[in-house]
Image (cartoon, rainbow, N blue to C red):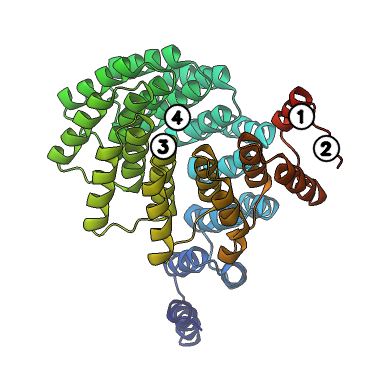
C-alpha cells in the first residue's frame, strides 16, 4: 500500500477513534479527509466516508458536497454527481456558484450544452449569478465547437452583467477566431481587451503571431513582437519559435538568424523545437554549411539529438546533391544508438537514386528489416520510381509486383510512366 494512501486511511481511523472517545469530529475535519481521498482518486473510500458522515449526524456543508461532486465529475460520473446535488438540496443545503460551475464544466466537456444551459436556468431562478469562471466555461466550450459568434454573444452578455472577462477568457476567444481564419476579428478583440484595461499576456500574443505567420503576414507578427517588448512582456521560447518559422517560410534567412541571435542574447534558452525549426529552415534555404555547424554545436553542447535532427540534415544534404556527407550522417545513427525511421530511409533511398546509385539504394531498401523498420507504401514507391528513373525497368516491375502483393497502393506516376513508355507490366 502506498505511503500516501496509508496516511489517509490512518486519518480516517483517527476520525473514528475520536468518535469512540466521545468527541464528535466537525465538518472541517471530515471535509479535509474527504478532499484528500478525492485528490488521490480513492472515490470509493470518499463515498463511504461521506455517507458515514451523514449517518452519524454530522451535516456536510456546501464545501463538503462540492468536493465530492467535483471528484465524481472528474471521473466522468456526472449522473452520480447530480444525485449528490439532489441529496444536497433535500438536506436543505443550497448549491452555490462553485458547485454549479463544476457540474456545468463537466457537462460542457461531454458536449451536453443544453443540459448545462438548464443548470444556468436553475441558477437564475435561485438568484445565483454566474461568475467569470462559469461564463469562461461556456465560452471555451462554444469556441471548441466552432461556435465563435455564439461565444462572442456570451462575452457581450458577460460584460453587460458587469463581469469583466479575464485575459484567459479573451485569449480563448482570440484562439478560436484565429483557428477559424478570422485573424482580423481576433486582432479587433485584442484591441477591445486593451481598451477594457485587460492587458494581453505572452500566450495571447503568441496565438496572434502564430496565426499571422501561418498566412504569411510575418511583418505584422514582427510588429506584435516589438509591441510586446515595449509593454514589458518578455517573449518566451514559443514566441521566438513562431516568428523564426514564419521568417524561414518566407525565405528570410538573415532575419531568422538575427532573431536567433536576439533570442540567445535575451537569455531565452532554445528548446529542441527551436533547434528543429532553425536546422530545418537553414536546410530548406540551402544554408547547409551553417546547418552543419549548428548541428555540431548542438552535439557539443550535450543536447540529446534524436533521429529527427539527423533526418532533417540528411534531407537537406540529399536535396543539394551532397550524397556522401548524407551517407556519413546516416551511418552515424547506428554509431550513436539511434534508429532511422521509415522516412529517413525514404530520403536516403531517393537521394541515392537521384545520384544514379540505384543498386546502393536497393541494398539499403533490403536492409531496412535489420533495423526493425519494414518498408511501407512510401518506401516502395520511392524505390520503384528510383528504378524507373535509372532505366531499371525490369527491377521496377518486379518490385511493383511485390508491393501490390503486399497490399500497398502504387503511385499514379508509375501508371503515367508505363503509358508514356509503352511498357507492358503484368501484375
| Mark closer to the chain start, 4 or 1 | 4
Toward the right, the furthest residue is: 426
Figure quadrant of residue 164: top left
Secondary structure, mark 4, is helix
> Does the CB distance between marks 2 and 3 fall below 8 Å?
no
233 vs 265, left or right, is: right
> Does the CB distance between marks 3 and 4 fall below 8 Å?
no
What residue does disc 3 label? 321
Task: Locate residue 32, reporting x and y percent.
Answer: 43, 66
Secondary structure, mark 2, is loop
What residue does disc 2 label? 425
What residue does disc 1 label? 418
Q: Nearer the viewer, residue 359 or 70?
A: 359
Figure quadrant of residue 44: bottom right
Question: Could you give the CA–CA distance between mark 4 and mark 1, rounded to whole angstroms?
Answer: 53 Å
| Mark closer to the chain start, 2 or 3 | 3
Question: Could you give the CA–CA distance between mark 2 and mark 3, rounded to whole angstroms?
Answer: 32 Å
Question: What quarter of the picture does the C terminus occupy?
Answer: top right
Q: Residue at x 55, y 16 (%)?
A: 149
Question: Is residue 11 positioned above or below 330 on the image?
Answer: below
| Mark closer to the chain start, 1 or 3 | 3
Residue 196 seen in render:
no
Residue 307 seen in render:
yes
What residue does disc 4 label? 172
Secondary structure, mark 3, is loop
402 vs 51, left or right, is: right
Q: Residue at x 46, y 76 (%)?
A: 24
| Mark closer to the chain start, 1 or 2 | 1
Task: Locate residue 309, reporting x and y percent.
Answer: 39, 49
Question: Could you give the CA–CA distance between mark 1 and mark 2, rounded to whole angstroms?
Answer: 8 Å
Amino acid at each position: 500500500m502506498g505511503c500516501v494512501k496509508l496516511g489517509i486511511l490512518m486519518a480516517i481511523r483517527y476520525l473514528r477513534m475520536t468518535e469512540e472517545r466521545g468527541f464528535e469530529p466537525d465538518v472541517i475535519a471530515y471535509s479535509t479527509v474527504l478532499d484528500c481521498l478525492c485528490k488521490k482518486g480513492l472515490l470509493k473510500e470518499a463515498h463511504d466516508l461521506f455517507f458515514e458522515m451523514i449517518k452519524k449526524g454530522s451535516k456536510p456543508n456546501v464545501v463538503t458536497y462540492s468536493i465530492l461532486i467535483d471528484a465524481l465529475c472528474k471521473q466522468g460520473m456526472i449522473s452520480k454527481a447530480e444525485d449528490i446535488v439532489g441529496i444536497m438540496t433535500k438536506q436543505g443545503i443550497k448549491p452555490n456558484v462553485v458547485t454549479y460551475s463544476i457540474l456545468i464544466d463537466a457537462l460542457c466537456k461531454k458536449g451536453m450544452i443544453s443540459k448545462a444551459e438548464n443548470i444556468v436556468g436553475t441558477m437564475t431562478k435561485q438568484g445565483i449569478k454566474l461568475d467569470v469562471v462559469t461564463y469562461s466555461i461556456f465560452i471555451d466550450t462554444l469556441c471548441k465547437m466552432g461556435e465563435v459568434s455564439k461565444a462572442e454573444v456570451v462575452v457581450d452578455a458577460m460584460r453587460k452583467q458587469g463581469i469583466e472577462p479575464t485575459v484567459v477568457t479573451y485569449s480563448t476567444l482570440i484562439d478560436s477566431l484565429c483557428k477559424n481564419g478570422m485573424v482580423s476579428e481576433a486582432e479587433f478583440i485584442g484591441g477591445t481587451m486593451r481598451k477594457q484595461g485587460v492587458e494581453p499576456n505572452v500566450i495571447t500574443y503568441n496565438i496572434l503571431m502564430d496565426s499571422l505567420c501561418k498566412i504569411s503576414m510575418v511583418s505584422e507578427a514582427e510588429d506584435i513582437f516589438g509591441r510586446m517588448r515595449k509593454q514589458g512582456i518578455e517573449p518566451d521560447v514559443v514566441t521566438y519559435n513562431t516568428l523564426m518559422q514564419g521568417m524561414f517560410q518566407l525565405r528570410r534567412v538573415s532575419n531568422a538568424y538575427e532573431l536567433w541571435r536576439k533570442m540567445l542574447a535575451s537569455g531565452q534558452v532554445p528548446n529542441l523545437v527551436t533547434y528543429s525549426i532553425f536546422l530545418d529552415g537553414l536546410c530548406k534555404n540551402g544554408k547547409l554549411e551553417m546547418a552543419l555547424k549548428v548541428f555540431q554545436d548542438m552535439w557539443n553542447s550535450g543536447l540529446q539529438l534524436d533521429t529527427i535532427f539527423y533526418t532533417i540534415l540528411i534531407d537537406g544534404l540529399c536535396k543539394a546533391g551532397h550524397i556522401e556527407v548524407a551517407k556519413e550522417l546516416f551511418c552515424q545513427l547506428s554509431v550513436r544508438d539511434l534508429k532511422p525511421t521509415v522516412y529517413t530511409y525514404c530520403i536516403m533511398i531517393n537521394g541515392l537514386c537521384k545520384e544514379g546509385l540505384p543498386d546502393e539504394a536497393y541494398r539499403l531498401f533490403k536492409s531496412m528489416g535489420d533495423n526493425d523498420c519494414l518498408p511501407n507504401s512510401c518506401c516502395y514507391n520511392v524505390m520503384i520510381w528510383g528504378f524507373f528513373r535509372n532505366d531499371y525497368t525490369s527491377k521496377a516491375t518486379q518490385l511493383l509486383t511485390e508491393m501490390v502483393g503486399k497490399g500497398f497502393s502504387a503511385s499514379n506516376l508509375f501508371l503515367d510512366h508505363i503509358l508514356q513508355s509503352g511498357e507492358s507490366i503484368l501484375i
